[in-house]
Amino acid sequence: MAPMIKIEGVDDEELLKIIKAKMDEAPARRRAREAFKEIQLGIDHCLLKIPYDGLKMKELYEVNPRGLEIFSKSWLPETSPLKAIVCFCHGYGDTCTFFFEGIARKLASSGYGVFAMDYPGFGLSEGLHGYIPSFDRLVDDVIEHFSKVKETMEYQNLPSFLFGQSMGGAVALKVHLKQPNAWDGAVLVAPMCKIAEDMVPPMGVKQLLIAVANVLPKSKLVPEKDIGEMAFRDLEKKKLTQYNVIAYRDKPRLKTALELLRTTQEIERRLEEVSLPILILHGEADIVTDPSVSKALFEKASSSDKKLHLIKDAYHSLLEGEPDENIFQAFDEIISWLDQHSIRNIPS
């Protein structure tokens, strides 16, 4: 049984029922999100406490070409003209709601149109929870969705940027490798170019898991440390992760784990092919994704416009789990970089 959590605004019986519900399929995740939506927005986190007036937000459920109903959301400034559009790729087990709500509002209030989707099997989108049968197929789903956004009449002539966090950094890089000339730049926050060695099972265990994955691809058998415990440096913010009720918290499914490992190995081999302008932020103390590979990406990428900031003492969740001052410094750097590159690319 999941541990009991006291959250103001939801009585114990209802909360326990939500927490105990099996989240394998989207309807259960959607019910949980609806029950916690207002509570999540009221938590004591610096990004969610700042009032953001003048933003237009829209949530959609649309069936993709593979027949899966995909959840997406957009955040737009209502009165100021758009500088560019930013297409967000979320991390493993996560969603484009909850903490990202604060991130998106921060970017939109700075003049950017922000677009995000939950991958199949994650967040509010259909699909078996936490299951990635093919990372390439997931990337194709992302390309299909964001291509529709970029083809919309009012956004066609605007600069467009990818924004990837953690596993979303790998998604963004794969999108770029499949569409080398389609984007004006990418912001990568603690990108999953390589899984930290401490997170990878020993070779013998790995070989066993590969063999079993051929028979039981959806099984949750991969040993794993608690990523949430290792990702947040600020202890008070770490407590807030319990409010992310639709996050995937179980052991990774076998096929998912192998797809992540295979993808990071591919990206590590292809760093020289990265050619678009990039801003990379990575915590030096990150033990979830390897900051040394962000350094290798910076050194090997063929782009002539690239910037790397390895942040001293910072953990994995740079925009959610660090002290307030550090979070806002990271945002200042991201928004400054986007501003510079939006001006540079705006059509005359």
Image: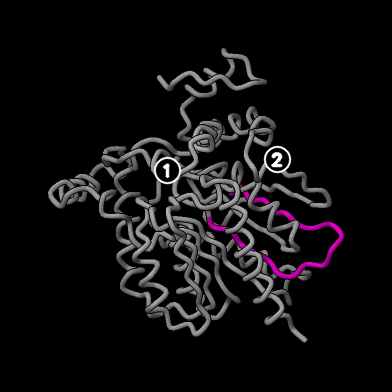
Percent coordinates x, y for residue 38 in the rendering? 69, 32
Q: Nearer the viewer, residue 196 or 87?
A: 196
Q: Is residue 272 magenta?
A: no
In the image, taking residue 151 as reference, residue 2 lies left or right, namely: left
Which amino acid type is marked by label 1?
A: Gly
Give residue 340's quadrant in the image: bottom right
Bounds of the magenta segment? 69-89
* Disc 2: which residue: 49
**First reached walking from the N terminus: tag 2 or tag 1:** 2
Q: Nearer the viewer, mark 2 or mark 1?
A: 2
Q: Residue 133: image x %, image y %? A: 37, 52
Q: Is residue 85 magenta?
A: yes
Amino acid type for the residue under numbered disc 2: Lys
Tell me, yes or no, whether the two marked residues, 2 and 1, touch with CB atoms within 8 Å: no
Q: Which residue is mark 1?
A: 130
> At x 50% / y 74%, what residue is drawn?
307
The prevailing secondary structure element of the residues shown in magenta is: strand
| Number of numbered markers | 2
